[in-house]
Image: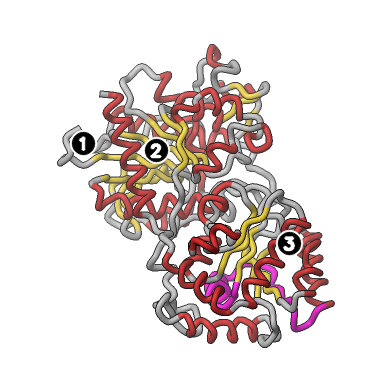
Amino acid sequence: MDSEKSMKVLSVASECVPFVKTGGLADVVGALPGALAPLGVEVRVLMPGYPAMKAAISEDAKTQELGRLPGGRARLISGPANGTDVMVLDSPRLFDRPGNPYLGPDGKDWPDNHLRYGAFCRLAAQIATEGLDGWQPDVVHLHDWQAGLTAAYLKLGRQPAPPSLITIHNIAFQGLFPPEAATPLGLPKAEFHPEGFEYFGQLGFLKAGLVYADRISTVSPTYARELMSAEFGMGLEGVIAARRAEVHGILNGIDLEVWNPESDPQIAMGFSAKTPARKAKNRVALAQRFKLYAGGAGPLFCVVSRLTRQKGLDLLLEALPRLLARGASLAVLGSGDADLETGFQAAASDNPGRVGVVIGYDEPLSHLMQAGADSILVPSRFEPCGLTQLYGLRYGTLPLVARTGGLADTVIDANEAALQAGVATGFQFSPIAAAPLADAIDRACDAFADKKLWAAMVRRAMRHPVGWETSAAAYAKTYAELIETAA
C-alpha cells in the first residue's frame, strides 16, 4: 500500500467512550481513532443507535434510509460526535431502550439480542463491501461478540470484501443463541457446523468472528496465550489454537490526558514523578473520605473494581486478616455480588479506621483513590488486560496483581532479581489463591517499610509507559499487513 495514502478502518463496536460503556471495550474503541490518526489511519466507528449515541451525534449529521435488515427497516446516521467520526444504526425497534445495552429491566439478556446485533453486523458488512458516500474501508476491525457475525457476512458474501480483524476483549461473553436464530439473520445452513459458526449446538457470534475473520487479536500477549488453554479459553481454545499464526496480543493503553496526576481536577493536589511528595496530600484526603487512620505503619491499599469472584475479591476477604496484621488499611470502591458487598461492609464495620467501603461507582472518587493510595489490589482470576493497574502505575500507586493476562504483562514484580536490576514497578502473585495473595501483601508491606526503596519504585512506576503510542503502532502494523496480504 502507498505509504502516503491513509488507511481507512471501519471499527465495529457495541460500546464507545464517552457515549456508552459497560467495560474496558468502550475505552479501547473510544481511544483508538485519536491514537491512530497521527499514524495515517482514518477510523470511523459504527455503533448501535442507543439513545445516548443518537443524542451525541451532531445536528447536521447525514441520514440514509436502509433496506430491510433483521428486525425491520432502519436508517444510518453519520457524522462527528465528540471528535470521533461515527456511523449509527438508527433502529428504534431494536435499540431505543434505556439502561444497560444488553440487559432488560429484569437483569437478563434482551430476548432479541440476536436480531439487534445481527442487524448491526449485517449493516457493517454492507458498508464494508459497498462503501458509504464514496468512503470504503481498507480494513474492518471487529470488537467482541456483538460485532463477530460481521466476519461471516464478509467471508460468505458474494461481493469482494476488505480483510477483517476481530479483537477479543473478554472471551467470557460469546453471544450464544438457539440454532433457529440463524434463519432470520440470513446465515447459510451449510455453515452451521463445528468449523463454521456452530458452537455446541448453538449459533455463536464470537465463534463466527474467530472462524471467519482474517486475523484475531486480544488485549494482551499473555491473554492471547492463555486463550489457547482449556483453563481460559472457555470452550473456544481449540478454535483459537488452530489459528495460532493469526493470533496476536496487543496491550491496551490509557488516556494520558484524562489520567494525568499533574493536572487531574478530581484529586486533592497534583503531583508528578519529579514531585512525588505531593502525593501525600491525596493520601490524607483519601483517608478522610473513607474515615481511615492515615498514620499507620503499613500501606494504604485500595480496590476499584466490580466485586466479583472473577476479580478475586473473595480471595482478598480471606487475606484481609494478614493485611490488617501488618498495620495496613484498605479502601474499597465497587459493587457486584451481594455476598461480597456484605463481606466488605462487615469488614469495615468490624475494623473502623482500618477498612472503608463505598458500594457503587464514583468516577471522581476513583481518581482520588488512584492518587491517594499507596498500592492498588487487582487479584483477578483472569484479566484480559486490565486498566486499573495502568492507572495505578501512572499515579505511583504500586499495583499488586495476580499473574494473569494483561496484569502479568504490565507490572514488573519486585522479586530479588528485579529489585537488584532496579526495574520493579509492583507486585505479582501466583497461583491465584488467598495464601499467595497474603504473601504478596507481606512483600508489599516489607517494601513500604523501606522508604527509599518504595520511593524509587513509585518514581519508576510513574515513568512506565502506559499510553497508546506503542499499541496504536501495533494496530497500524496489523492493518497494513492485512491490506498487503489481501492485495
Which of the numbered marks, if any, corresponds to residue 439?
3
What is the x, y in percent for residue 57?
36, 55
* Identity of the residue drawn at 52% across and 76% down: 455
Q: Nearer the viewer, residue 372 or 198?
A: 372
Is residue 409 a member of the stretch shown in magenta?
Answer: no
Q: Residues within 10 Å of mark 2 (few under 14, many from 20)?
A: many
Span highlighted in magenta in the image: 351-374
**Viewer-nearest of discs 3 and 1:** 3
Which three-letter amino acid code belongs to the residue tagged 1?
Answer: Gly
Residue 245 falls in which quadrant of the image?
top left
* Identity of the residue drawn at 49% across and 61% down: 421
Which three-letter amino acid code belongs to the residue tagged 2?
Answer: His
Would residue 391 be found to the left or right of residue 449 on screen? left
Q: CA distance from mark 3 to mark 2?
A: 42 Å
For residue 339, above or below residue 245: below
Would residue 25 be found to the left or right of residue 256 on screen? right
**Residue 21 visible within the image:** yes
Q: Which residue is mark 2?
A: 141
* Identity of the residue drawn at 30% across and 51% down: 79
Q: CA distance from mark 3 to mark 1?
A: 60 Å
Q: Name the N-terminal-most of marks 3 and 2.
A: 2
Q: Which residue is mark 1?
A: 134
